[in-house]
Amino acid sequence: MELGLLKVERLRDGLICFAVFLFAKWLLGSTARKSKLPLPPSPPGLPMIGHLLMFRRDFREVFRGLKEKYGSVFSICVGPQTIVVMCEIDVVKEALVSQAEAFSDRHMPPLLKHGLGSAGSFAFDNGPVWKARRRFGLSAMRTFGVGKYSMEQRIVEEAKMLCETIENNQETSFNPKGLITHSVSSIICGITFGQRFDLNDPEFNDLISRTHSALSTISFFSLGHLFPFLLETPLYSEFRNLISSLKTLVADMVDEHGKTLDDQHIRDIIDLYILEIREQKKRGDEIVFDETTVWRGIFDMISAGTGTTSTTLLWGILLMAAHPDAMEQVQNEIDRVIGDHRPPSMSDREDLPLTMATIMEVQRFRPVSPLGFPRFTNKDAEVQGYSIPKGTAAIVNIWELMHSTKYWEEPDKFKPSRFLSDDGRSIIKPDAFIPFGIGSRVCLGEILAKMDVFLTFTFLLQRFTFRLPEDSPTNSEGIPGISFRPHDFLIRAEKRV
């Protein structure tokens, strides 16, 4: 009985807090409307929930329709939150490049904030603390070889083991998701935790599985995003349990590092993290890191370093199997430049323009992050003659940039040649091609992702021809969301060399 009353009281308190939040947002909105400039155009919405019900349909259809009606910049409301959507590259650059500081903030989705908190995050803190964490993250990755030959060797070795495992599945159709995810995850986890995890390692597989499950649950347009008090209800009990177990798993790994740390023999990024905390205390600097939130930064690294790269490679395999002529052309180029006697190298990129163009077309045709992560204005701004008040969320419609007839001929066709010069010898990169984002919040792991995708994709096509099973229907349209993933699919791998 007492437990039931407690839940009722929590729900009541949540409703009161949310009502106060709505009132505060209304006051802020009233202040913003005093600007002489108009707000970006917006369709009629409903009280309390705004335009949430529109997103019962695919967001791509919704945003395409709104762009056609209102132009390249418009606004929507999800509950009390105003969101400005930018659909053309000149608008995006005006906001995120020319006014990078004003659009530099990020707010954590309520689902993640509720379970993980933002303290210690590389992705969601703001201001000087975020800048210091980002500098540390970039420095740590360089220390452990990102962008260097040592990392290239690590990726090639992992790709070799991936190919050996695929060879064992030659006789049957198989789902490549687990193998690709493990291969990619092994790279970032190797430099983070200082060891390579076996394909059948239960702790490692549990970590990666829980990370992907947590991220796939997040949506800009979910009830939990709109009504955060619902996160305490049974509706989200499974998500709470998932986040709690994930937090414990990563925190335990970090604690073990602290017990065995030898500052004369740095093993991985966690060791660097712990040493930075100690040096920070000695210097008496502002607290940027602390022992209780090391796991939070590590979670950001793992989630950023595994999801986008593995999804890009899965799309690459699926699209190659669906376009055998394009795959054969890439394989012919690889055979001519590399042959079958050695693995690919980053130095091969300039001599493999078609391979590079094909990877870029995979990223354009099926962008892994179709809406990026929202930025938030930390002061009033102006874009295209519209007022963008402080606290407004800004979304780059990357899907629209990658599929607009303004920038691409026949954008709904898979055509790697669109990224090649007329003579086919060099790469052309249009301004609208921004798979890793743009501005001050560009993806922290971009360099590592580019290395991993190029080396693994090239290695796979050097070794195998991929076929879709004739008796297995394949959906290549993908699953819309924060991450645009392919549906699970089966593939056949025929050994070439």
Image (spheres, grey):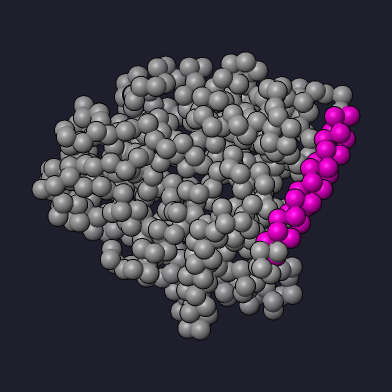
- State whether residue 232 is above or below residue 345: below
Main SS, magenta region, reads helix
Residue 384's place in the image compared with 244, above or below, is above
Query: Is residue 135 visible to the viewer in this orientation of the structure?
Result: no
Q: How many marks?
A: 0
Q: Magenta span has 22?
A: yes
Residue situated in front as seen by the camera: 108 or 57: 57
Q: Quadrant of residue 488?
A: top left
Q: Is 447 rendered above or below residue 359?
A: below
**Which is nearer the eye, 70 or 385?**
70
Does the magenta segment cover residue 422? no
Choose between 197 and 29: the one closer to the eye. Answer: 29
In this picture, residue 367 sits left or right of residue 174? right
Q: Is residue 444 left or right of residue 493?
A: right
Rendering coords of residue 190 (x, y %) = 39, 65
Q: Quadrant of the N terminus?
A: bottom right
Q: Position of residue 77 (x, y in %)?
A: 69, 33
Q: Residue at x 46, y 57 (%)?
A: 211
Above or below: residue 59 compared with residue 242: above
| Residue in the picture at 16% in, 51% down | 169
Q: Is residue 35 left or right of residue 467?
A: right
Residue 310: % across, % down? 37, 48
Residue shown at 67%/51% (left/top)?
A: 228
Residue in view at x 42 percent, y 21 percent: 411
Residue 410 visible in the shown view: yes
Residue 271 in percent (x, y) is at 51, 74
Q: Magenta span covers which residues?
A: 6-34
Residue 128 sits in which quadrant? bottom right
